[in-house]
């Protein structure tokens, strides 16, 4: 899916009011002040199947609930007045909302609704505002008709849409025959697959533009992985589960293995491509070496042997943590290398809130972002963030102080 209109055809965004979410104030179960949504819904009464999604500040704080919703004119019997509202039933998500939270009502291409709620000033809020290019939001509803939006989705937009459960990665059927001849109907090791993915891209340079190369390889590997995964999963579904093909427990186990493989593969692919980029730039490093308390930082520069040598100045040591999603997980890297006071963390998570990046800075954590992702941060935030090319230059300068 190359454009957002293939997924979402229109959205409305506003701040939640007290009367909409506080049961002590009202039990009306309606979103108010959304008459502008006539541009998307029209004027006739409609019922929708909707999914409420609450995106909290922590990575695992995602709550979903399916609900029927009704779009109607509360003044339909009045001769001259109209007052459109969206009625919803009690659900697990609305109970988490507070006044001032961001509300986004999205109409999908299949005519269902996704109701998104995020805490005010959170990373999730920043990501939703970035996704739909919303600025200067106040209590009034902002409406975006996206049906004619055919602009190609960026890496950052795909990332945020995946948080909402939308799969924007398309398979590449023209690669299937090559994938099967090379790997058979099996998943190879993540390192082998990352190497293969890089071999299918010829027009990027890890030396001239490491930021572009990293994003290009990550996207290519995702598409190739999905191509092979679709084939393997389809074959398994044809075979069925258990002796009679209907074993529910075996099906659930298989489904969980698919989900877990996707998550672990993404993180490992990130590390593999970074390691290749560092090697191509003649940067020396240790990957997953053990430091204090059996910690294993993702990368130590110029190498663990220098880290373990008390005579080697800590001024020339660098540690890089790797997290596809930062959110609250960034704190994990703070204790992974005691000798290095200023840590570095690279992520592909777009539009982290200023509250979070300020807290990172207070803990002496330097954020590293591929350039396409860096552009989703505010100009003020970008002053304290470096891209991958800048990070490579930093460790290259420090590497001069080794004997190598």
Image (tube, helix red, strand yellow):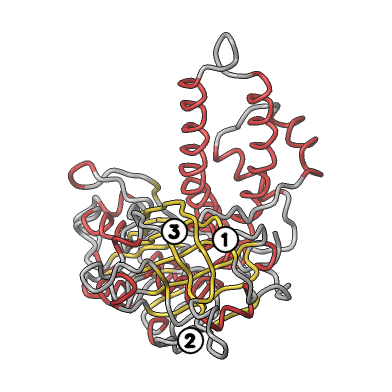
Q: CA distance from mark 1 to mark 2?
A: 30 Å
Please say if 335 is above or below 8. Answer: above
Name which of mark 1 and mark 3 comes first in the sequence: 1
x, y percent for residue 349: 45, 64
Q: Give residue 104's position: percent from left, percent from top.
A: 47, 71
Q: From the viewer's side, name the closer residue of 181 and 61.
A: 61
Question: Looking at the image, can residue 320 be seen?
Answer: yes
| In the image, residue 353 above or below residue 325 | below
What residue is pinned by disc 3? 52
Q: Residue at x 42, y 81 (%)?
A: 382
Would you say 15 lies left or right of 157 here? left
Where residue 387 appears, as percent x and y from the top left, is 48, 73
Residue 199 is left or right of residue 64, and the answer is right
Q: Alpha-carbon neighbours of circle 3 within 10 Å: few (<14), some, or many (≥20)?
A: many
Q: CA distance from mark 2 to mark 3?
A: 23 Å
Q: Quadrant of the C terminus?
A: bottom left
Q: What is the quadrant of residue 206 in the picture?
A: bottom right
- Relative to 251, residue 2 above or below: below
Residue at the image point whose x is 37% and y is 50% from the top: 298
| Number of other residues with Cα within 10 Å of mark 1, as a class: few under 14, some 14 to 19, many 20 or more | some
The alpha-carbon separation of the residues under discs 1 and 3 comes to 15 Å
Disc 2 target residue = 135
- Count residues near mark 2 (Cα–Cα under 10 Å), then give few for <14, some for 14-19, many for 20+: few
Q: Residue 183, image x and y in percent?
A: 69, 30
Give the SS element for disc 2.
loop
Instruction: Tell me the number on the disc at residue 47.
Output: 1
Foreground disc of the pair 1, 2: 1
Sequence order check, earlier mark of 2 and 3: 3
Q: Secondary structure at mark 1?
A: strand
The tag earlier along the polypeptide, 1 or 2, is 1
Q: Are marks 2 and 3 in contact (CB under 8 Å)?
A: no
Q: Secondary structure at mark 3?
A: strand
């Amino acid at each position: 899916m190359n454009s957002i209109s293939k997924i979402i055809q229109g959205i409305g965004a506003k701040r939640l009011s007290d009367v909409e979410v506080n049961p002590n104030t009202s039990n009306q179960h309606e979103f108010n002040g959304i008459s502008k949504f006539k541009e998307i819904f029209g004027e006739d009464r409609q019922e929708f199947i909707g999914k409420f999604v609450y995106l909290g500040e922590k990575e695992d704080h995602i709550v979903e609930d399916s609900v029927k919703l009704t779009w109607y004119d509360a003044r339909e019997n009045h001769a001259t007045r109209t007052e459109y509202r969206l009625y919803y039933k009690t659900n697990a998500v609305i109970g988490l909302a507070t006044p001032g939270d961001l509300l986004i009502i999205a109409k999908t291409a299949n005519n269902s609704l996704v109701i998104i709620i995020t805490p005010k000033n959170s990373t999730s809020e920043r990501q939703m505002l970035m996704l739909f290019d919303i600025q200067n939001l106040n209590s009034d509803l902002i409406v975006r008709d996206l049906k004619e939006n055919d602009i190609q989705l960026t890496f950052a937009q795909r990332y945020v849409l995946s948080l909402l459960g939308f799969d924007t990665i398309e398979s590449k059927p023209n690669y299937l025959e090559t994938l099967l001849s090379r790997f058979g109907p099996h998943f190879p090791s993540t390192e082998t697959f990352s190497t293969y993915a890089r071999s299918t891209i010829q027009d990027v340079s890890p030396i001239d533009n490491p930021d572009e190369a990293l994003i290009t390889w990550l996207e290519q590997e995702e598409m190739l992985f999905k191509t092979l995964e679709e084939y393997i999963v389809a074959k398994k579904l044809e075979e069925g589960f258990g002796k009679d093909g209907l074993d529910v427990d075996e099906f659930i186990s298989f489904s969980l293995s698919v989900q877990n493989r996707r998550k672990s593969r993404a993180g490992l692919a990130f590390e593999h491509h970074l390691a290749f980029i560092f090697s191509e730039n003649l940067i020396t490093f240790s990957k997953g070496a053990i430091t204090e308390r059996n910690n294993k930082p993702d990368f130590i520069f110029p190498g663990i042997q220098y880290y373990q040598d008390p005579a080697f100045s800590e001024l020339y040591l660098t540690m890089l943590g790797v997290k596809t999603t930062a959110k609250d997980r960034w704190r994990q890297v703070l204790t992974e290398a005691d000798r290095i006071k200023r840590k570095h963390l690279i992520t592909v998570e777009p539009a982290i809130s200023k509250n979070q990046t300020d807290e990172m800075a207070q803990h002496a954590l330097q954020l590293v972002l591929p350039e396409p992702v860096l552009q989703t941060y505010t100009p003020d935030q970008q002053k304290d963030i470096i891209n991958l090319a800048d990070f490579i230059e930093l460790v290259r300068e420090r590497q001069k102080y080794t004997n190598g």
